[in-house]
Amino acid sequence: MKNSYGLQWNLHQALKCAILIGDFFLNHFYRITMAPKHGQLIYEGKAKRIFETDLEDVVLIEFKNDATAFNAVKHEEFEGKGRVNCEISSHLFELLGEAGIPTHYLSRVTDCWMRSKRVKIIPLEVVVRNIATGSLCRQTPIEQGTKLFPPLLDFYFKDDGLGDPLLSEARLEKLGLISEKNQLNVEEISLHVNDLLKSFFKKADLTLVDFKLEFGVDGNGQILLSDEISPDTCRIWDQRKSDDKDRILDKDRFRNDLGGLVDAYGEVLKRIQGVSSKQHNCS
Ligand code: C5P
């Protein structure tokens, strides 16, 4: 009896192992066969890889399944996250482009691949907040859930080694990473993006709590909204849910061990697609 149980247990473990290995190779094969033709890897970040193309001023961006938090101390892979984030980002960049925001986005290629203009990223993270939460509440006595109107806009220095520190106006000037004119331009674009996204998300019963933007400069010296806009870089709450945890549809699900990350991101995509198709049907 004991032996037959032991045998069953070993068979069960062997089967589980075979499924895991098969899954790994299938995903790997899928990733390679779905990849569009690309050149050299230019840069690999925590959530994306950037590749050269035949055109000097065009790059291919691959959205990875990796999720990181707390300056990459926490790391996990989520099957399907790259594709969903690529699709959400593409949708939002298209929406912003149509509204006149200058962005690096050119087109979505397949699956988790996007084509964009080549830019030199300015090492600044622009964070816009509509509702107080996250680091703002950890670092100040401002209470969780406080509505911020006008929205709060802060610059952070994009440097993992230094933990992306918050910059004062004086430090920003001292660093000399951006001219005064471009800084004003970036601030104006970021607040305009906030207005556009906030009202778009509202139509999908979603609240845009806060988000981070990055900007780059193209070959002509033009400032372009770059990087990605996805639940990895935004906090998004579901207006159809009242529970503090259930309503979270962004990377806080991973940061706070709430589970259901890919389902939550998928819900954001579904809602965005719903609003977009309604808008197209009306026009
Ligand atoms: O952590 P904190 O509250 O400052 O984050 C504000 C917003 O910026 C959140 O939406 C978060 O996802 C985003 N963020 C980001 N990348 C960072 C820091 C913050 O996308 N390095």
Image (spheres, helix red, strand yellow):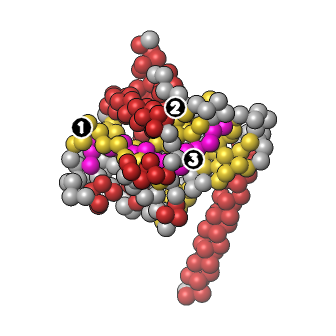
Q: Amino acid at mark 3?
A: Gly
In the rendered structure, find residue 93 and report the number of the disc placed on it.
Answer: 2
In this view of the protein, which residue sits in the foreground, 42 or 69?
42
List x then y, in percent, for residue 273.
46, 30
List x then y, in percent, for residue 21.
68, 64
Q: Secondary structure at mark 2?
A: helix
What residue would you read off at disc 3? 82
Pointer 3: residues within 10 angstroms few (<14), some, or many (20+)? many
Residue 122 vertical position relative to residue 95 in the rendered view, above or below: below
Horizontal side, residue 183 vs residue 5: left or right = left
From which residue to which does the magenta span run?
A: 116-132
Residue 175 vertical position relative to residue 21 in the rendered view, above or below: above
What residue would you read off at disc 1? 149
Q: Is residue 190 visible?
A: no
Label 1 within 8 A of ligand 1 by Cβ = no
Q: Quadrant of residue 83?
A: top right
What residue lies at 75% left-to-right and 35% top-to-bottom?
Answer: 56
